[in-house]
Image (tube, grey):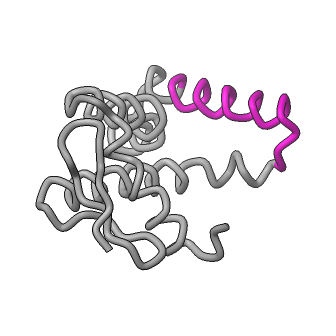
Amino acid sequence: MYRSLADIWRGFQKNFYPAFQHEWTFWGYLLFHASIFTLPLILPVVAPSWIATSALVGMLAARLLLAARFRHPLWTVLMHPVAEVVLLGIGVASWWRCRTGRGVEWKGRRYLDRGAGGVGVRE
């Protein structure tokens, strides 16, 4: 289905923001991901402390346990920080394109925001 990072970006961007019924739930989701899965990667560098290091170790341990449980390769754990940054980027890009009226494109069609929780297609 997806053959490149650009395809992944466009495919997920189409549904990301419109999947939320309220804007506050969208931003809450992004804030949750940023604080739980991205901030622990940054804190030990910018504000070293045992709490920051514990948060990083806990987050990576949880990701490692999930990888083991679902038999994902180890490299998926190592790529987790990149995946989180891409997730946040896709979310913000989806919000921006929907809120500015530009819509998102997928397979030659443009999807326009039709209010909270709905998109319409304009070819």
- Above or below residue 54? Residue 113 is below
Q: Quadrant of residue 115?
A: top left
- Please report the bounds of the magenta region as a residue range: 54-73
Drawn side of residue 105 relative to residue 55, left or right: left
Q: Residue furthest left?
A: 100
Q: Quadrant of the C terminus?
A: bottom left
Q: Residue at point 75% right, 30% down?
A: 66
Chief secondary structure of the magenta portion: helix
Residue 73 position, x and y percent, is 84, 49
- Above or below residue 109? Residue 48 is above
- Above or below residue 117? Residue 106 is below
Residue 59 position, x and y percent, is 58, 29
Between 12 and 50, the residue placed more toward the observer is: 12
Q: State yes or no: residue 60 in magenta.
A: yes
Drawn side of residue 64 relative to residue 57, left or right: right
Residue 75 position, x and y percent, is 76, 54
Q: Residue at point 44% right, 53% down?
A: 85
Drawn side of residue 9 relative to residue 99, left or right: right
Q: Quadrant of the N terminus?
A: bottom right
Between 6 and 57, the residue placed more toward the observer is: 6
Q: Residue at point 20% right, 33% down?
A: 23
Q: Quadrant of residue 45?
A: top left
Drawn side of residue 96 relative to residue 117, left or right: left
Q: Residue furthest right?
A: 71
Between 120 and 103, the residue placed more toward the observer is: 120
Q: State yes or no: residue 72 in magenta.
A: yes
Q: Residue at point 45% right, 34% down?
A: 40
Residue 25 position, x and y percent, is 28, 27
